[in-house]
Amino acid sequence: MKKTVLLFSIALLLAFSFRVHSQGIPNLGQTDQWMKGALAAMERNDYQTANQIFRNLIDSGLPLPNEMPYYFALTLYELGQYDNSSNFLNKYFDLNGFNGENYDLAKNLQEDLKAPIAEIKACQLCDNKGYRWETCPTCSGSKQIQQDCSYCRGVGVVGCSRCAGKGLITKRNIFNIVEYFECDRCSGKGRLDCPTCNGSLKEVSDCKTCRGLGYLSGEIICDHKEHDHSSEK
Ligand SMILES: [Zn+2]
Ligand SMILES: [Zn+2]
Ligand SMILES: [Zn+2]
Ligand SMILES: [Zn+2]
């Protein structure tokens, strides 16, 4: 018993010292390494690699270097992710104000972003981030879909509300005596065909995947041009 307690506290101690180490200097080195790698990739116009490295840096949860949002915004601009680029550029200005090392370049990028962002806003073929709309795979663009009836949950019948499901209703006659009658609404069955699906168990309703729109944001960056599919044979 004592042995286990001792082993356990050693394990705790080890875990604790690891934590202390992992929050110390070695990780600052990691950030520097990532930044160097990303900037080198940008230099050789390999923005995909730069993007991947910046994302690793963000995912690591380590503090971001002040100039990083500018370089990331430039990378996203080059990859055509204009909305995302604009967000990181704003982050850069928030973080550094007028004092960023890349302030002038960041201002230029802000100008360069205006036209493509205006194009996205004006285009009906893509969402507000510039991703091309795609036909919803669930409803194939028909906006509606046959689903289990939501009212009866696919049972097909509901309890009769007039007789509270008993099939009988009571009335007092003129002699104040209780008389029983068969419920005329459900013909004494106590149950009715579901009023939503009429017993078919199915209901046609808005497609839940696309919320009745018929299309979804895709993963392809939009070129804001109609593609003529009729000529493809
Ligand atoms: Zn749909
Ligand atoms: Zn009834
Ligand atoms: Zn139903
Ligand atoms: Zn578009």
Image (spheres, rainbow, N blue to C red):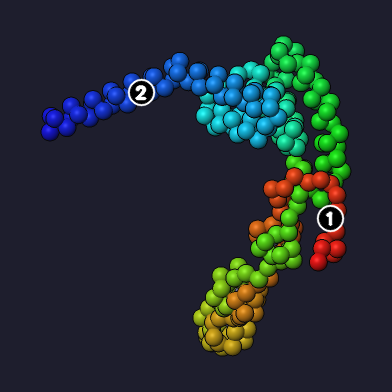
Q: Measured along the vertical axis of the image, is residue 22 above or below residue 154?
A: above
Q: Residue at x 74, y 33 (%)?
A: 78
* Percent x, y of residue 54: 61, 29
* Residue at (69% x, 57% y) in the render: 210
**Which residue is labeled 2 in the image?**
18
- Image-quadrant location for residue 215: bottom right
In front: 92, or 219?
Answer: 219
Residue 227 badge: 1
Picture quarter with the N terminus: top left
Q: Is residue 7 left or right of residue 140?
A: left
Question: In which image quadrant can residue 168 be found?
Answer: bottom right
| Mark 1: C-beta under 8 Å from nearest atom of ligand 4 | no
Find numbered disc 1 in the image and state the secondary structure of the residue it sits on: loop
Residue 185 at least partly seen: yes
Image coordinates for residue 193, horizontal then vertical, percent:
61, 80
Q: Is residue 151 left or right of residue 113?
A: left
Q: Amino acid at mark 2?
A: Phe
Mark 1: which amino acid?
Answer: His
Name the residue nearer the viewer: 160 or 227.
Answer: 227
Q: Residues within 10 Å of mark 1 (few under 14, many from 20)?
A: few
> Which sits in the foreground, 136 or 152?
136
Q: Position of residue 134 (x, y in %)?
A: 73, 55
For the residue pair 127 and 160, the one nearer the viewer reads as 127
Element at label 2: helix
